[in-house]
Image (cartoon, helix red, strand yellow):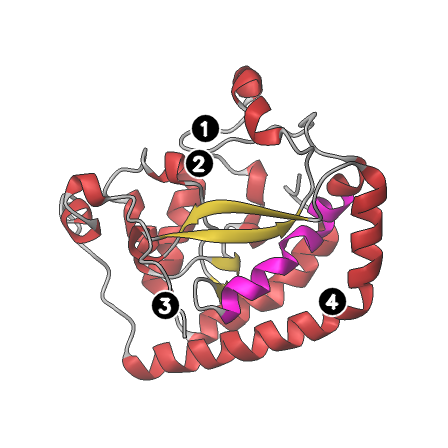
Amino acid sequence: MSLRTPAADVFAAAGGYDAFIARDPDGPVPAADLVGAVFKRLVDLLGAVVGLLLVLPVFPLLVLLIRLDSPGPVFFRQRRVGLRGRVFDCHKFRSMVVDAEVRKEELAHLNEASGAAFKIERDPRITGVGRFLRRSSLDEFPQLYNVLRGEMSVVGPRPQIPSEVAAYTPAQARRLQVKPGLTCLWQVSGRSHLDFEDWMKLDLEYVRRRSPAFDLRILSRTIPAVIERKGAY
C-alpha cells in the first residue's frame, strides 16, 4: 500500500500556519465540533459520488469537445492551497491553451483583480469550449475527485495558488481554517464582480458561521448563481 507524500506547507517559512495566524490580533476562529465535522465529511462523500454519477453521461461529450477545440490534455492539474496552508493537486477540465501558465506573466498588465488574485474578463488564453465550461462551471467537476480524497469539501472557500496565498495577511489566512470547496459564499454573491477584499470578507464570514444549515443555504443558492452566470469568466 502506497503512502501519500506529506503536503508542502505554504507557511513553513513563517514557522507554520499556527504561527502565522497568531499574528492576527483577532486570533483563530473556534474549530467545528466533532459531530459537525463528521456530518460534513459524510455529506461531502455523498455529494461527490452523486455529482460524479450526474456528470458521467456527458463526460464523453466534454472530452470530445475539449479535444476538438484545441491541442493539449483534457484535464488541467494545478497546485492549490488547502486546509491550514497545505498544498495539493487541484483538478479541472482544461479551459485554457496549454501554455497558459507561461503566458500569465506577459498578461499581468491586464489583470483586473485587486489584491492577491489574477482575473481577466476577456482572457485571451481561454479556449472557445473553455469559455463555455467556465461560464457553466462544468470545468470544476473533476474537483469532485479532490472531495473524495478529502482535500476539498463541497462547500468552502475557493482554493488559490501558492503565490497568491503567500501574499495573504494573517487575518486573510484564517480562511484556510476550513477545507476549500466547490462552491462558497463568494461564488453565490457575484464572484469575479467582487473585489479581493470583499472576497476575503465573505470567506471569513463563512468560516465564522459554518454549519450544516449554512452549507445547505449556500448550496440552494449555487444552482441559480450558475444559471445566471453572474461574475463567471
- How many neighbours does mark 1 have within 10 angstroms: few (below 14), some (14-19), or many (20 or more)? few
Q: Are marks 3 and 1 in contact (CB under 8 Å)?
A: no
| 60 relative to 161, above or below | below
| 135 relative to 84, above or below | above
The disc at residue 114 is 1
| 133 relative to 207, above or below | above
Could you tell me which secondary element the residue under label 3 belongs to? Answer: loop
Q: Are marks 1 and 2 in contact (CB under 8 Å)?
A: yes
What range is drawn magenta here?
Answer: 132-148
- How many neighbours does mark 4 have within 10 angstroms: few (below 14), some (14-19), or many (20 or more)? some
Q: Which residue occupies the foreground of this view, 38 or 221?
A: 38
Where residue 163 appears, as percent x and y from the top left, is 38, 34
Mark 4 or 1, nearer chain start: 4
Q: Amino acid at mark 3?
A: Leu
Where residue 97 appears, as percent x and y from the top left, is 69, 33
Instruction: Using the numbered discs, state the Cα–Cα distance from disc 4 to disc 1 in whole angstroms.
Output: 34 Å
The disc at residue 55 is 4
- Residue, x 59% and y 22% (percent of image)? 103
The disc at residue 3 is 3
Q: Is 28 left or right of 232, judged from the image as shown?
A: left
Q: Are marks 4 and 1 in contact (CB under 8 Å)?
A: no
Q: Which residue occupies the foreground of this view, 134 or 209?
A: 134
Could you tell me which secondary element the residue under label 2 belongs to? Answer: helix
Instruction: Using the numbered discs, state the Cα–Cα distance from disc 2 to disc 4 in whole angstroms.
Output: 31 Å
Instruction: Using the numbered discs, state the Cα–Cα distance from disc 3 to disc 1 in whole angstroms.
Output: 39 Å
Where residue 171 appears, as percent x and y from the top left, is 25, 44
Q: Kindly report the secondary structure that dominates the magenta region of the rendered protein.
A: helix
